[in-house]
Image: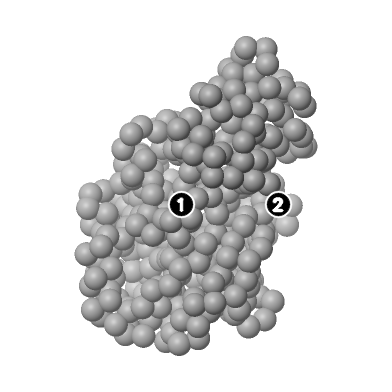
Amino acid sequence: MRVDLFDFDLPQELIAQRPVSPRDSARLLDVAPDGLHDRTVRDLPALLQPGDLLVFNDTKVIPARLIGTRTSGGKVEALLIRAQTPDRWLAFAKPGKKLKIGDVLTFDGLGGKVAAKYEDGSIDIAFDRGGPALLAAIETAGAVPLPPYIRGGTADARDRADYQTLFAKRDGSVAAPTAGLHFTPELMARLADAGIATAGVTLHVGAGTFQPVRALDTDQHKMHSEWGEVPQATVEAIARAKRVVSIGTTAMRLLESVARDGAMRAWTGETDIFITPGYQFRAIDLLLTNFHLPRSTLFMLVSAFAGLDRMKEAYAHAVAERYRFYSYGDCCLLRR
């Protein structure tokens, strides 16, 4: 499909720069069969049914933006994308063109070297340590990898907590599964009281999910792969569920990656699924997701799920009503 079909006017001032507090006071646009309804996230228990299952992504964002020096003494900035091995990460770097294989990089006591360069401008960094020791060093040396639409990508101390969900427990993401940011312990208790179950999956979100689509046609866009896991307990919970409600597009992409190959099952591996209109959904009945940017793969995904015309109508309403967009913004509830 033509990428320009997924374009719309988004005033820059509607891209949220901070989350609301408390988190569950964010606005929720209920895209229902009988029309569009302005609600808040706190209304969610009343919008769901006993027996529904909420599936969350339990990935944890690491401070993946590293700033340091290279062999020449010049400044280098690296955005880690995903782990290749325990001591080696794929990354986007600035200035990428000036870097050479073998160049030594130093980030606040964490050392590494350029091990490979790729045509898309990414590099492999081989660090001087691996596993938990590397993650601990990244925690010290790194900054929260905010997208550039939020304060130019410059994070501060508040973002360490703001850009992490209630469910975060498995290190590995370089971007938050942002629909999960709206949940609080109080909301979770009310959902449980309403007979709504929960389950978890893990998808370590890479920067590729949020990269702009520069191609003219969706067939020409290549997604980066991301590592995910669906545990057996979640498979069993899905089998018991009345309806499956994906909390965010990352959980949806993982479950649909498994379901497109047959019945839902426990699974571990890499996925580069790219969902556009015409895709046949097999795993998800409802989707809670934030508002996404024009021409993005995520707006394409929600258009595939709820219909392009319906989503353009919903987004036009959201813009007119001054909803807040993107990672720290408001959300919408969509039916398949």
For residue 21, side relative to residue 4 (left or right): left
Q: Which circle marks residue 60 in the picture?
A: 1
Q: Give above or below for 116 relative to 10.
A: above
Q: Residue furthest top?
A: 73
Judging depth in this view, the residue of 169 and 64 nearest the camera is: 169
Q: Secondary structure at mark 2?
A: loop
Judging depth in this view, the residue of 210 and 76 nearest the camera is: 76
- Which residue type does callout 1 highlight? Lys
- Which residue type does callout 2 highlight? Lys
Judging depth in this view, the residue of 236 and 19 nearest the camera is: 236
Residue drawn at the location 46% of the way across and 81% of the way down: 237
Q: Secondary structure at mark 1?
A: strand
Residue drawn at the location 46% of the way across and 47% of the way down: 61
Q: Give above or below for 99 relative to 89.
A: above
Q: CA distance from mark 1 to mark 2?
A: 25 Å
Q: Does residue 149 appear anywhere in the picture? A: no
Residue holding disc 2: 222
Q: Which one is closest to the eye, mark 1 or mark 2?
A: 1
**For mark 2, does the 10 Å Cα neighbourhood hold few (<14), some (14 to 19), or many (20 or more) residues?**
few
Residue 285 percent location from the top left of the image: 47, 78
Residue drawn at the location 36% of the way across and 32% of the way down: 156
Q: Earlier in the sequence, mark 1 or mark 2?
A: 1
Residue drawn at the location 63% of the way across and 66% of the way down: 268
For residue 218, side relative to residue 132 (left or right): right
Residue 263 percent location from the top left of the image: 63, 83
Residue 52 percent location from the top left of the image: 38, 81
